């Protein structure tokens, strides 16, 4: 649990290999949450606010300037009421996180999702391999206490709905704990 007792709303990190469904989950959660939560697509923020050192055309991705990114996000995280949606999570300080959701997907299904994005083959291969090797889950486990991490399957619409319902239950419990 975060040490920041001042927050009135939680910070929820939704992470996972690209294509596992982070943005889809974050959008639905922001719509259905009983308390206002702002969905922050961290990759979009990096692009829009130029929090990077340039675009790596080989990997088709930005080289993130982590210091700039943390400075940008710090006030939002301190305030709370945000969903941080990013394919990596270890950069976010432990004190920010109230809940860390790691989405998982069968690698063959993930491959198909990434092919639809027209990623270069080696980027698809790298992400597919990372999913098989549970890289993001291990990263979350080495960055946050076990009790705030939840690993959820994201392979169907039923998974999406039940995952969001489960996170909403967690939000209600968080709220009840922070009102007393
Ligand atoms: N639980 C799910 N079941 C089926 N398809 C999903 C699920 N979650 C996401 N998708 C689909 O997979 C693709 C990637 O989802 P997206 O949310 O953009 O992933 P991410 O934000 O992790 O890169 C989208 O086409 C989305 O509709």
Image (cartoon, rainbow, N blue to C red):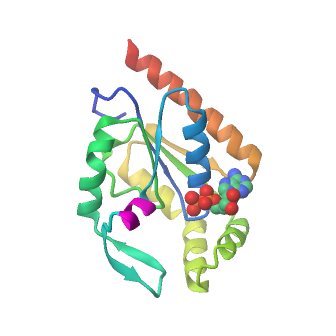
- Displayed quadrant of residue 145: top left
Q: Which residue is drawn at 47% across and 88% down?
A: 58
Percent of width and height locating residue 75: 26, 43
Percent of width and height locating residue 111: 68, 72
Q: In this view, does 61 lie to the left or right of 124?
A: left
Q: Which residue lies furthest to the front in this view?
A: 48
Does 46 appear in magenta? yes
Work out whether residue 20 can be spotted: no
Percent of width and height locating residue 8: 36, 26
Work out whether residue 117 can be spotted: yes
In terms of image quarters, where does ligand 1 lie?
A: bottom right
Q: Residue furthest bottom?
A: 58
Percent of width and height locating residue 158: 76, 44
Q: Residue at x 72, y 71 (%)?
A: 112
Q: Is 105 placed above or below 130 here? A: above
Does 126 appear in magenta? no
Q: If the image is split into quadrants, where does the N terminus sit?
A: top left
- Displayed quadrant of residue 48: bottom left
Q: Which residue is drawn at 70% across and 40% down?
A: 161
Q: Which residue is drawn at 40% across and 75% down?
A: 62
Stretch in magenta: 43-48
- Displayed quadrant of residue 49: bottom left
For this rendering, which residue is in front, 154 or 148? 154
What secondary structure is the magenta-colored segment mainly? helix
């Amino acid at each position: 649990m975060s040490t920041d007792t001042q927050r009135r709303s939680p910070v929820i990190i939704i992470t996972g290999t690209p294509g596992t469904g982070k943005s889809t989950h974050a959008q639905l959660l922001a719509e259905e949450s009983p308390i206002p939560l702002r969905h922050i697509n961290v990759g979009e923020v990096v692009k829009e606010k130029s929090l990077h050192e340039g675009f790596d055309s080989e990997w088709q991705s930005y080289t993130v300037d982590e210091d700039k990114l943390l400075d940008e996000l710090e006030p939002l995280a301190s305030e709370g009421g945000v969903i941080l949606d990013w394919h990596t999570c270890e950069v976010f300080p432990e004190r920010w996180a109230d809940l860390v959701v790691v989405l998982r997907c069968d690698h063959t299904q993930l491959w198909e999702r990434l092919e639809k994005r027209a990623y270069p083959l080696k980027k698809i291969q790298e992400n597919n391999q990372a999913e098989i090797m549970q890289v993001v889950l291990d990263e979350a486990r080495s960055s946050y206490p076990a009790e705030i991490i939840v690993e959820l399957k994201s392979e169907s619409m039923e998974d999406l709905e039940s995952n969001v319902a489960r996170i909403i239950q967690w939000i209600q419990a968080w709220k009840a704990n922070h009102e007393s």
